Structure formats: structure tokens, C-alpha cells
Amino acid sequence: MLDRLGPVNSYVPEYVPEQGAGNDILNIIEFLFRNKWIIVGSFLVALALSSAYILIAPVRYTATAQMILDPDKGNIGQPEGRGEGPVDTATVESQIVILKAERIAQAVVNDLHLDQDEEFVPSKPGIKQTILTMLSGTSPPLNAEERTQVALERLQKSLEVKRVGVSYVIDVAFSSKGKHKSALIANAVAQAYLQTQADMRNDTIQAADKWLEDRLSVIRSETIAAENAVQEFKAQTKNAASGAVLVDLESYARLKRNLYETYMQRHMEITQRESSPAVVARVLSRANPPLERSEPRTFLVFGIGAALGLALGSAIAFIIECIAKYRESRGGY
């Protein structure tokens, strides 16, 4: 019966391996091995370019001075001990803005004569200035105001001021081509800030003192007039019925005298505080010349260069294989 049915055609399906993570990794390894010379070549070129950048890039050094804000501060115009409290985040951020302000930078430029420094105001124009000169056709020399402005911009660009965590400590960092110059300017910025704070406090105290002096002059005149009125009234009036008027005059004179003494006491307090002004910050540690350069960062440059070299080599190899497969699918054309 089986013979009548004829031969049985057995079909054995072709084994197709499952595509999984293991095969993907194997394919990647095979791809890298097939194109190893392209990837290695790109890697070596990237390292060579990184080495060239490190050799030709200008070396810069960063020095850091640290300042600390006093956790308590007194308010001018209020008695000692009042209006004091912890320095909040807004106050710390405000001090950071003041440290970056043009007034501080202007003081540093003037003190260190940075407008005459070749690093800040180079005698040879840079690429940007050269292009502008080519477009305009003229290259007039910088005047004193322009040199100062250029020095200000370069100083503020190289200055970094930041808060250390949530503490009262502020880092004042400056980057320069010279080790000692970076420390010198960082310390100068900190000192200029302290001097500016002291000047602002003294200006406020003097303004309050001037207002009190003017007010004292007026109250003194009113007090003298009130006391003279009492004496004149006593000398001219002998009538007992006028006793109520005399009481009113004496009360008014005492009021003026007490007001005058109060203002006089406040005037003396402000004068004493002016003789020993307190600033809201002090230098925690001065900047020292750094031992190592901050730019260029050798390991960072080589790391980025190596990563880009490997990525670029892999991309080139992938494009080459895609082109080869495409040409193969088109019959070699």
C-alpha cells in the first residue's frame, strides 16, 4: 500500500540561528576586525592632532583666592545689635555680582596698569581685529579709553567667581599666561572688593551723619528757642492763672531737649562706627602661584581626541562597507 503512494519526500527545514545579543556582539567584533587598519589609522591621526594642539595651544594658569562672608552684619542707621541675622542666598549671590562688576575690574586695571599689559591689550592685532581691519581698510591705534575698555573685557572674561556649595565661602579664580600674574590679579580682585565695600559703607555712614548733623542743627535751634520762651514767660508773667501756659511751654522745651539728646547720642554712635568700619567679607586664603597649568588639560584633550578618532574611524569604515554592499547588490556597478 505504501508502494502505491509512491516515495515520501521528506523536507528538512534549513536551520536559521536566532538573532540575539550574542550575535550582535559577534558582528560588531567582526566589523572592527575587518576594518582595524582604518580605525587604528583614524585613532593615530586624532592622537597626532591632539598632540599638536597641546604643543601650540597657549598655556594658562589659574590661581584662586577664597573669601568668606561674615554670617552676621550690622545695618547702618539702626542701633548696634538690631537688624542682624544670617547672610541669605540672595545676599551671597549679590556679593558675587559685585565681585564681577565693572567697578571692581576698573580698580584692578588701574592699580596694576593692565591697559599697558601685552596680555590684555596686545600690540599685534588678533584674528578678529585683522579681519575688521581688512574690511574697513584702516587700523587706527587705540586711545587710552579704548585700551582700558579692552583690558576690562579681557579681565572679566578670565575671571570666575563662584560660591562653594551652600557655604559663605566664595572662590575668586583668575586665569592668565603667567603663574605669578594669575595669583596677583586674583588677590587684587579680592582686595579691590574689600576696599569697595569699605568705601560704600563709609559713604553710607557719612550720608547718615550729614543728615543727623542737619537735623541736629534744626532741633538745637528749636530747643534753644523753646527754653528761651520759658525763661521770658517766667520773667514777664507774675499772674498765677498763667500757670497752665507755663506748664505747656516747659513740656514743649523738655520734649525738644530730649529729642536733641537722642539725636546727639545717635550721632556719636555713627561717628564711633565710622572710625572702625566693618566690611561684610574678609579674605580666607590668598591666591598662590599654581604649580600646574590649567589649560590645555593634557588628559582631557587626549581622551576627547581618542574618542573622536575611534568614532570617526568606525563611521568611515561603516560608510565604506555600505558602499561596497550597495555596489555588490547592483552587480558590481
Image (cartoon, grey):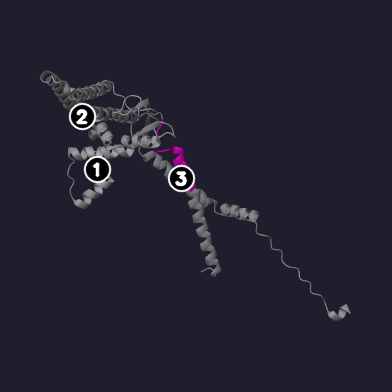
- Give residue 305's mark: 3
Name the residue rendered at 21%, 38% in the picture. Answer: 147
Residue range corresponding to the magenta coloring: 292-307
Name the residue beneath numbered marker 1.
125
Front-most of residues 26 and 121? 121
Q: Secondary structure at mark 2?
A: helix
Q: Residues within 10 Å of mark 3 (few under 14, many from 20)?
A: many
Q: Secondary structure at mark 1?
A: loop
User: Is 187 left, or right, of 142 in this rendering?
Assistant: right
Q: Residues within 10 Å of mark 2 (few under 14, many from 20)?
A: few
Question: Of callouts 2 and 1, which one flags the residue occurring earlier in the amino acid sequence?
Answer: 1
Distance from the alpha carbon under mark 2 to that under mark 1:
53 Å
Name the residue rendered at 22%, 29% in the picture. Answer: 207
Name the residue beneath numbered marker 2.
211
Question: Of callouts 1 and 3, which one flags the residue occurring earlier in the amino acid sequence?
Answer: 1
Asked where in the image residue 59 lies, by quadrant, the reply is: top left
Name the residue rendered at 29%, 23% in the picture. Answer: 277
Name the residue rendered at 65%, 57% in the picture. Answer: 20
| Residue 186 placement (x, y as % from top left) | 33, 30
| Residue 133 placement (x, y as % from top left) | 21, 48
Distance from the alpha carbon under mark 3 to that under mark 2:
66 Å
User: Is 298 left, or right, of 270 in this rendering?
Assistant: right
Q: Secondary structure at mark 3?
A: helix
Asked where in the image residue 234 lies, by quadrant, the reply is: top left
Residue 121 can be seen in this image: no
Query: Would residue 296 be counted in the magenta stretch?
Result: yes
Front-most of residues 17 and 214? 214
Task: Identify which amino acid the numbered label 2 is placed on.
Answer: Trp
Question: Of callouts 3 and 2, which one flags the residue occurring earlier in the amino acid sequence?
Answer: 2
Look at the magenta stretch and give its main secondary structure: helix
